[in-house]
């Protein structure tokens, strides 16, 4: 548990090698005001029980010798176990609800087509919430805090959604505990963190009138074949693909998050049309892939966007709350959405920088 000793000031040779990751784990814990009587430390991170749903934070170092030093930071919250991955009702439920509630994190499960490959002995299908980011020295000053705030809704919504028993379609809440845990003396710190974000979200949208969308449009017009425009309130980019229809990336300031208030909504829509069940399975596979090492941050969720006649297409949505506004965040969001488009359409993945 070298990271824990490093974070608490007890430096060891092994801990010094993990300084960048140790500091990130400590900052995430600080943002959440983690009660350490409710934590079990691991060599690669920690497990935390703010209530009955386990939140796991993990830091894994890139081992292929790539420079600069890069770590994958992942945050996962248990949600449902024994899910019926062969049930069309469940697939549609998970897909549609992830579109409503998953704009800051992903709903993740192993779809039926891949279950035999990923299953372990005695395991049953589970659904969990996830965020993933890639840490380097260049982004270490802001990324851990950004990741922590983007993940705060994971355990909050696990609790809220699990109370709607009639909507689970066979899954049961994946609650747990540990004999090592003490009784917490803290109040609901996650709700306090969310309240602070929502308070910032009650103010005027911080991206409006910054000129960022116009500058972005000017830059992205250089992409061959693209159509792009931006104004004080939104940014739209149509990316040429093989076929008649383009992929569409949009940033907008006119959507208010039901829990976080004002902020920046980013959407990526792909012209792949299929029935709702098949599209939900495709999105589930992509959400699972995004939890693995692909060098593209997972700050949102793939889900089926319902069209006419039970037809659907894949859409990825991410929401950056007002509280996380920063110069350049809009530009990064477009980069991330474009990387996802290239990854799923052409199996092209970015090179870490």
Image: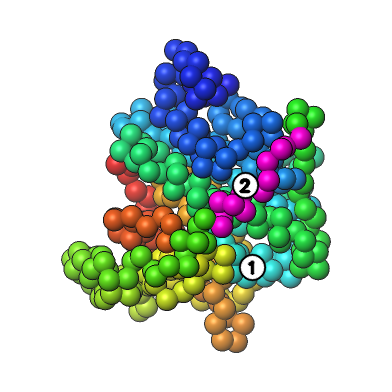
- Vertical relation: 106 (above or below) 255: above
Give the residue drawn at x 64%, y 42%.
55
Which residue is nearer to you in this view: 117 or 249? 249
Residue 65 position within the rendered picture, expressed as x and y whole percent measured from the top left: 36, 27
Which residue: 71% across, 55% down?
A: 159
Distance of label 2 from label 1 (alpha carbons): 25 Å
Reply yes or no: does residue 193 show up in magenta: yes
Which numbered mark, 2 or 1, is in the foreground of this view? 2
Residue 106 appears in the rendering: no
Residue underneath mark 2:
189
Q: Relative to 229, is 26 on the left or the right? A: right
Residue plotted at (68% across, 55% down): 158
| Depth check, front residue: 346 or 21 | 21
- Residue 50: x %, y % from top left: 68, 43
Q: Is residue 158 above or below residue 91?
A: above
Q: Which residues are magenta?
A: 183-195
Local SS, label 2: helix
Position in image of residue 173 (x %, y %): 77, 53
Is residue 202 visible in this depiction of the protein?
Answer: yes
Residue corresponding to mark 1: 97
Looking at the picture, how far across and down is residue 79, in whole percent? 70, 52
Query: Viewed as shown, does residue 21 lie left or right of 166?
Result: left
Quarter the C terminus occupies:
top left
User: How many other residues sit within 10 Å of disc 2, few (<14), some (14-19) or many (≥20)?
Assistant: some
* Disc marking residue 3: none
Residue 79 in the figure: left or right of residue 275: right
Q: Secondary structure at mark 1?
A: helix
Marks 2 and 1 in Cβ contact (< 8 Å): no
Task: From the viewer's side, name the closer residue of 113 and 146.
Answer: 146
Up/down of 333 relative to 54, above or below: below
Q: Few, some or many C-alpha atoms within 10 Å of disc 1 (few <14, some 14-19, many ≥20)?
A: some
Asked if the stretch drawn in magenta spans residue 15, the answer is no
């Amino acid at each position: 548990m070298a990271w824990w000793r490093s974070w608490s000031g007890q430096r060891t040779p092994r801990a010094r090698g993990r300084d960048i990751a140790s500091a990130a784990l400590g900052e995430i814990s600080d943002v959440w005001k983690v009660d350490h009587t409710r934590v079990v430390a691991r060599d690669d991170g920690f497990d935390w029980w703010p209530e009955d749903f386990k939140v796991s934070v993990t830091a894994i170092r890139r081992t292929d010798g790539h420079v600069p030093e890069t770590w994958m930071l992942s945050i996962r919250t248990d949600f449902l176990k024994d899910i019926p991955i062969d049930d069309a009702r469940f697939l549609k439920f998970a897909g549609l609800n992830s579109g409503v509630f998953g704009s800051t994190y992903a709903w993740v499960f192993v779809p039926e087509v891949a279950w035999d490959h990923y299953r372990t002995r005695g395991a049953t299908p589970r659904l969990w919430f996830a965020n993933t980011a890639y840490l380097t020295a260049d982004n270490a000053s802001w990324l851990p805090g950004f990741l922590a705030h983007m993940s705060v809704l994971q355990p909050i919504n696990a609790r809220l959604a699990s109370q709607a028993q009639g909507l689970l379609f066979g899954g049961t809440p994946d609650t747990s505990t540990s004999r090592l845990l003490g009784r917490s003396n803290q109040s609901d710190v996650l709700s306090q963190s969310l309240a602070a974000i929502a308070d910032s979200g009650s103010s005027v949208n911080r991206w409006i009138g910054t000129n960022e969308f116009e500058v972005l449009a000017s830059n992205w017009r250089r992409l061959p074949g693209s159509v792009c425009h931006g104004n004080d309130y939104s940014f739209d980019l149509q990316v040429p693909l093989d076929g008649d229809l383009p992929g569409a990336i949009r940033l907008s300031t006119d959507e208010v998050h039901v829990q976080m208030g004002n902020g920046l909504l980013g959407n990526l829509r792909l012209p792949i049309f299929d029935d709702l069940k098949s599209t939900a399975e495709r999105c589930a596979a992509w959400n699972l892939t995004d939890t693995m090492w692909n060098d593209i941050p997972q700050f949102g969720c793939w889900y089926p966007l319902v069209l006419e006649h039970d037809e659907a297409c894949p859409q990825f949505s991410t929401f950056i709350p007002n509280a996380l506004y920063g110069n350049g965040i809009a530009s990064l969001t477009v980069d991330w959405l474009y990387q996802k488009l290239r990854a799923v359409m052409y199996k092209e993945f970015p090179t870490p920088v």
